[in-house]
Amino acid sequence: IALGDPASIARSGKADKALCELEGKVDLIVSSSVFNFIPKNDLPATMDRLGKLLKSNGGILCHSDWPEGDRHPDGFTIDRAKEIYRMAGLTADSMEVTKMQVMASEESSIFVGVAKKP
């Protein structure tokens, strides 16, 4: 769906219309380092919208985010992931903290989660 300039989209309501047209039609949503940066007040509405976009009986949300730790005290935990999945009407499929190669000789921890729409 071609929407045009972001500022004019926001004023015109085209984005909301386009998103409504996509409800229940999306097989897969993938996000990387997104959920940690959504303001807490916006998270319930954002997750509700994402859940509505996914197809019933198997639409998948796959995300990676910073895990909770010294560098990221507000990072992801299994409980936090389950909570955002609940906001979207999804069920957890898998969640884990794993390592990701960030440079040739450096690794970083990353939270990876997958949830499905029933």
Image: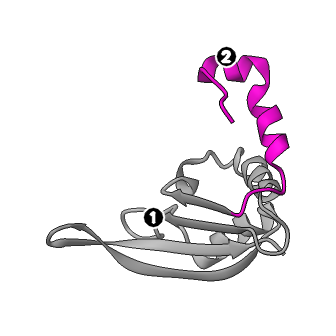
Q: Badge 1: few (under 14), some or many (20 or more) residues near its Cα, within 10 Å?
A: many
- Residue nearer the viewer, 97 or 61: 61
Report the residue marked by disc 2.
Answer: 8
Task: State the image coordinates of residue 79 (x, y, percent, origin top left).
Answer: 66, 76
Amino acid at pointer 2: Ser
Residue at 79% from the left image edge and 68% from the top image edge: 86
- What segment is highlighted magenta in the picture? 1-27
Q: Nearer the viewer, mark 2 or mark 1?
A: 2
Report the residue marked by disc 1.
Answer: 66
The quarter in which the N terminus is drawn is top right
Whether residue 19 is in magenta: the answer is yes
Task: State the image coordinates of residue 47 (x, y, percent, origin top left).
Answer: 74, 55
Residue at 67% from the left image edge and 16% from the top image edge: 8
Q: Badge 2: few (under 14), some or many (20 or more) residues near its Cα, within 10 Å?
A: few
Task: State the image coordinates of residue 81 (x, y, percent, origin top left).
Answer: 64, 71
Q: Is residue 115 above or below residue 8?
A: below
**Which color mode does the image show?**
one colour
Q: Residue furthest front?
A: 1
Task: State the image coordinates of residue 56 (x, y, percent, origin top left).
Answer: 85, 68
Q: Is residue 25 left or right of residue 99?
A: right
Mark earlier in primary sequence (2, 1) = 2
Q: Is residue 69 left or right of residue 47?
A: left
Residue at 81% from the left image edge and 64% from the top image edge: 55
